[in-house]
Amino acid sequence: MIALRGILATLRREPRCPTREACVAAGQLAEALRRPPPGALAEDGDAEAETFFINAGLCLNALSKHPGVGKSHWEPLASVTAPLLPRLPARQLTLALNAFSRASAAHNDWLCAAAAALRRPDRGALSAQDLLLALSAFARALHRDEDLVLRLVRDDAPPLVEELHPKGLAGVAQAAARLAEAPSAGGASEAPADAAAAQLPVGGRSDLVHHLAALLRGIAGRVSRQRGQLFRGAEASGGGSGGGGGGGGGTSLGPVELALLADALTRREASSRSDGAVEETLRLVAAALVPASGSLAPREVVMVVAAFARRGRLPTPLPPHPPLPGRPVTAAPAVGEEDLASGLAEALGKVMKELSPHELAIAVHAGAQLNLPLRCSAVVSEHGWQQMLSASGEMDVEHLSLLLSALSKLLFQPPAAIWEVVTRQLPELYTNGSIAHASRIVLAAARADWRDGRLRRFARRFMQWSSEGGGGLRAWSTEEVASSLYARLHPYYFDVVDLCRLLVHTFCERQVERTQSLDLQARMALHALATFASGRNTRGLESETLESCRALLGLEACTADERGFWRRGRGGSRRSEMQVEVEHSLRILLVPAPHLAAAAFTPAAGDAGFRVEACVGPFAVDLVLPASGERRDDECRQKQKK
């Protein structure tokens, strides 16, 4: 017992003890847990065993806060704690779960044993802090005993939501959102035999996600109801960052909690199942982040910017304090989206030098997606450019694609050294088949007017490889199809075959999920084909079939639909001058003569009177027999005279 108290004192010492001392303490802790008191393994443990378990849980939790202690020191601890898990009280069990998950040292068998202990009927009632620790541990370890988590979120969590302090609210919200998106628990090859009972029956997966989403809405509802208290003093860097769970801690949300809530409420299950409370809470968080953005730590800045980029746009800030009785409600909030954008851009420039290369790529890409004023911030200062150039050498091709995409969207030309690093890593994309990263790289090259023969060959080969591989173009997202169309419109990367393939796919497979962006890129591509691939520039079109060329004409017709193309998006869209010009020229280029248009829209080849296919410009028409052709020409002349 004395040894455990001494170990705990060493691990809790301020200032923090060196990593070497923490590793020594980890070895001593393993020896102490290997020889527990006699009553520790008995069904009815005595007071000495209870004190031993309390100190052991506190030691494990304190050790997890020393990042320098590696897995080689945690593995012996996992083996000696596994037999003790069924005897641990609920608080010490959740502390152990939290400690091993934070250290990334909890293997599947250990987690299954801990989950089985937590399911025991004699474990006692969970407190709000126990709920926070358990859900956070399962979310962090990406391991889910679905039956246990369902019980936690359906039975234990709802009555405890009102007891959670600000840090606990934010922590449980993020854990629930991550669990809703996490894959199911490992298969039989990864889990022990007795874990089969822990899996949900058919339909249980959707039931679990439903209750996780309900828990998120419950947390959002409480934050909205208690906005006056929870958002009081949120601009202070230390507000609300006290102990989590049901006891202790501050009474308002601090920067850490605001970042966690922003991350949780923008994940799929929170945003897609919103009943209004989630959106309102997100707007409250946005308003609180305006004064608090300067207090965000580096990782919290990345979390917030990436969360809003996942949402697609910045939320409109909503002031947390309602107007006083008798005073009119103002139409405009105290702060706007511009204030939030400026604050986040300034915060990103402030912490940029402390970000890892991967965090830097994610943050700059997210900031560019949100149109943050990064061009006026320290992100693109001389020091910022030097840091991006230095970090690019340590990035993998996925994060390089994010950085290139961001810089091209910000209208900056990435340095030649970054392009060289990217082209050397292009073969990796053939191995992992990442369509999103490949399309970002080619799109960035087209935007930045970067001409490299290796990139052009890569664009053609990857297009062919991915369209013929598993899933074909159906595996591409709508954004990836639109990006590829845009990139192929650059003169250097212009490719007739790829454009036709993408356009035919858009017409045949994307009728329901087409967006205004995809429609615009499709019409620009049709314009380019009609302009640059007509007459003698038809190389590549000879392989196109009549069916595919009819699809191009069908795509032109459906994207020109006033009820479709120009009305997509929020509240419809007004045509720009460029869109009007494209529309006007398409009408001239695509339908040069009435009889060609009529022949192009006739039924499939093989019907009466149609025998031959031929190319006219980029599009195919049916050449009719002489008699039918003369009759059709006469009809067209009569219509023209009328």
Image: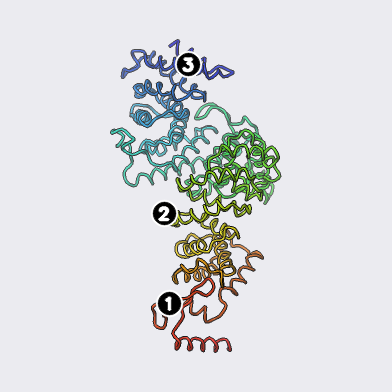
Read off the residue under disc 2.
469
Element on which disc 2 rests: loop
How far from the left and from the top, in percent, is residue 221?
A: 52, 42
User: For this rendering, which residue is in front, 356 or 619?
Assistant: 619
Read off the residue under disc 1.
603
Mark 1 or 3: in front is 1
Mark 3 or 2: in front is 2
Q: How many marks?
A: 3
Crowd around label 3: few <14 · some 14–19 · many ≥20 (10 Å): many
Read off the residue under disc 3.
25
Q: Is residue 187 above or below residue 469?
A: above
Q: Is residue 562 visible?
A: no
Q: Earlier in the sequence, mark 3 or mark 2?
A: 3
Element on which disc 1 rests: loop
How far from the left and from the top, in percent, is residue 241?
A: 58, 30
Element on which disc 3 rests: helix
Query: What's the amino acid at mark 3?
Result: Ala
Quarter in which the C terminus is drawn? bottom right
**Callout 3 touching callout 2 (CB < 8 Å):** no
